[in-house]
Image (cartoon, rainbow, N blue to C red):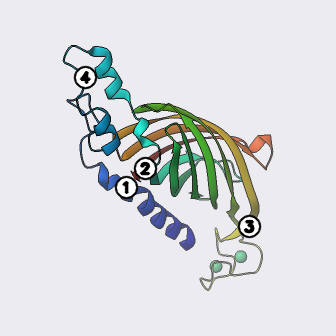
Amino acid sequence: MCCRIVILVVGTWLALSPAISLAQLPDGLTKSRWAMDDPIYSEKYGDGAGKLDLPGKVKQAADARFVEGLFGWYGAAGISSLGKNGNAMGTLEAGATGYWTSYFTNRFGLIAAVNDQDSYIGGETGLRLQTPTRLAPFVGLGLFAGYADSEELADNDDIDNDEDGHIDEWGEEKTRFDGVLAAIYPEAGVHFWWTPRLRLSAYARQMITTEGRDSDTVYFGGTIGVFSR
Ligand SMILES: [Ca+2]
Ligand SMILES: [Ca+2]
């Protein structure tokens, strides 16, 4: 139990620390040239579209091709049912990602998932294809690999499993190691560039697990990514 609390606290901090950067309004609320803080974008749109040039204004409001070469850290929170018991688990992810081109990213991270019965900890990696735009739908493929354990009743084994000085007291539990659990997933979602360096994402994944089709599950998540060049 103590281990789970540590996972939760550390994970929550990792996932939420980029959120502090959100304490500003999205860029370009009143102007279509939304990414003038980025040198590549500002060079391209230094002159800007004319007042009556609607297609030009739409283009400069949507264009996010400057993200090529950006590198970022992300924190994510989600919900899934990765454990053996099949109940909903809260998940946290944290890792690093980068733009190889304006429309292609990959990432490496860590994931932890817990509920009151199960816990799961592992690594994750994935690839995504997106439109090079400020609001950017994406599709991706990813992989989780880690190990799962769960709590089970141990009130009849003559062992003081929780070391509280009482053997087999009412409701005593022990941790059972459930083994390695991996999943591959296709995913779909959408990114929104809050600023030229801060990206929000929401997505759904269809988890195809090594535990068989009965254990397959859907995973919903949201991410904050902070980028630099
Ligand atoms: Ca005990
Ligand atoms: Ca016991």
Q: Cα distance, mark 1 to mark 3?
A: 33 Å
User: Of the residues shown, which amino acid type is indicated by label 3?
Assistant: Phe
Identify the element where label 4 is drawn: loop
C-beta proximity under 8 Å, tags 1 and 2: yes
User: Residue 208's spot in the image, x, y percent?
Assistant: 73, 42
The residue at the point 35 percent across, 52 percent down is: 19
Residue 182 % position (x, y): 73, 53
Q: Which residue matches tag 3?
A: 177
User: Of the numbered discs in the image, which one, if any, rests on residue 63?
Assistant: none
Between tags 3 and 4, which lies in front?
Answer: 4
Q: Are marks 3 and 2 in contact (CB under 8 Å)?
A: no
Please state which amino acid type lies under the numbered disc 2.
Answer: Gly
Q: Which residue is mark 4?
A: 49
* Of pointers 1 and 3, the one earlier in the residue sequence: 1
Q: Of 92 and 197, which appears nearest the observer?
A: 197
Residue 115 in view here? no
**From mark 1 to mark 2, how far is it between C-alphas?**
7 Å
What's the CA distance linking mark 3 and mark 4? 61 Å
Q: Residue furthest right?
A: 212
Within 10 Å of disc 1 (Cα), the crowding (few <14, some 14-19, many 20+) is some
> What residue is shown with label 2?
225
Three-letter code for the amino acid on which mark 1 is drawn: Pro
Disc 4 vs disc 2: Cβ atoms closer than 8 Å?
no
Q: Nearer the viewer, residue 104 or 13?
A: 104
Pinpoint residue 197: horizontal percent, then vertical percent.
36, 47
**Which of 59 and 155 lies nearest the eye of the viewer?**
59
Image disc number at residue 18? 1
Residue 32: quarter of image = top left
- The answer to whether residue 149 is visible is yes
Foreground mark, 3 or 2?
2
Q: Earlier in the sequence, mark 3 or mark 4?
A: 4
